[in-house]
Image (tube, rainbow, N blue to C red):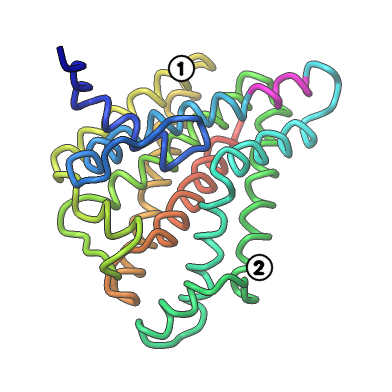
Amino acid sequence: MPAPSAPPWSDGFRFAFGTLTVFPVRVTRWDRDAARGGMLAAPLAGVAVGGCAALPGVLLLALGGGPLLAAVASVAVPAALTRGLHLDGLADTADGLGSGKPAEDALRIMKRSDIGPFGVITLLLVLLAQVAAVARAYDDSWARGAVTVVVAAAAARLALTLAARAGVPAARPEGLGAAVAGTVPVPGAVLAAAVVTAAAAAAGALLGPVGAVRAAAGVVLALAAAELLLRHCVRRFGGVTGDVFGGLAETAATVCAVVLALGR
């Protein structure tokens, strides 16, 4: 008898974890259906990455390492678990936007292997903001720091789900951006946003009512910032690329972490 085929949802999970993380998951399908499932499952990959990032932070805090060292560890882990692809995409997107050149030339700049001044400055400021925000959260309590790290990671991948919605074109005919662009139906993207926001609020509620509101606001504002960047990139480049997706993820993660670090 032939081996039973994998259920459809399995292909989506494999796509999400196989393309967005370094977890040993083999992508068995690379078609539009698998890409749709993968982008819808992207926030789950974010939760897994965020959970792995929170562990060393909490451990270092418990060992007396202090909030700053814990924050550095929690920011470094997502970079390692994504091979730095999102950070690289952020830098390339910054170089493309900062060049001020027409779309074709800007896309050519983004494909280069080197990083220009706009990319370096953007990377530096974003990483500093992430470390500062997470350190502030850890300084309040280990639980708040962990919630901040996990919710920010989920919000970052949720931004990818929304960016892959129908109606958002690809800037190039090849690459990851083209593979996932326009695959997610708008109702599915909206439902994913609602589920992740509600889950973030539930996680924040562990810290009290204010924590629930802050976590939900963090996700909403993160998505708003990512949406502004997305629209600007579509206007400048004619669509999305893999680099743009990376830039959206890091933008959403940073804004979410900053919001969750505010207040007492």
Between 84 and 54, the residue placed more toward the observer is 84
Answer whether residue 58 is magenta in the image: yes
Q: Main secondary structure of the magenta part?
A: helix
- Quarter of the view holding residue 225: bottom left
The quarter of the rendered structure image containing the C terminus is: top right
Q: How far apart are the alpha carbons under marks 2 and 1?
A: 37 Å
Answer whether residue 122 is magenta in the image: no
Residue type (three-letter) at the residue carrying disc 1: Ala
Q: Where residue 31 sits in the image (x, y, percent)?
A: 21, 46
At a point 41% along the width and 77% down the height, the residue shown is 107
Residue lying farthest to the front in this orientation: 1
Q: Where residue 260 sits in the image (x, y, percent)?
A: 54, 35
Helix, strand or loop at label 2? It is: helix
The disc at residue 120 is 2
The quarter of the rendered structure image containing the N terminus is: top left
Residue tagged 1: 205
Q: Which residue range is magenta in the image?
A: 55-61
Helix, strand or loop at label 1? It is: helix
Between 94 and 260, the residue placed more toward the observer is 94
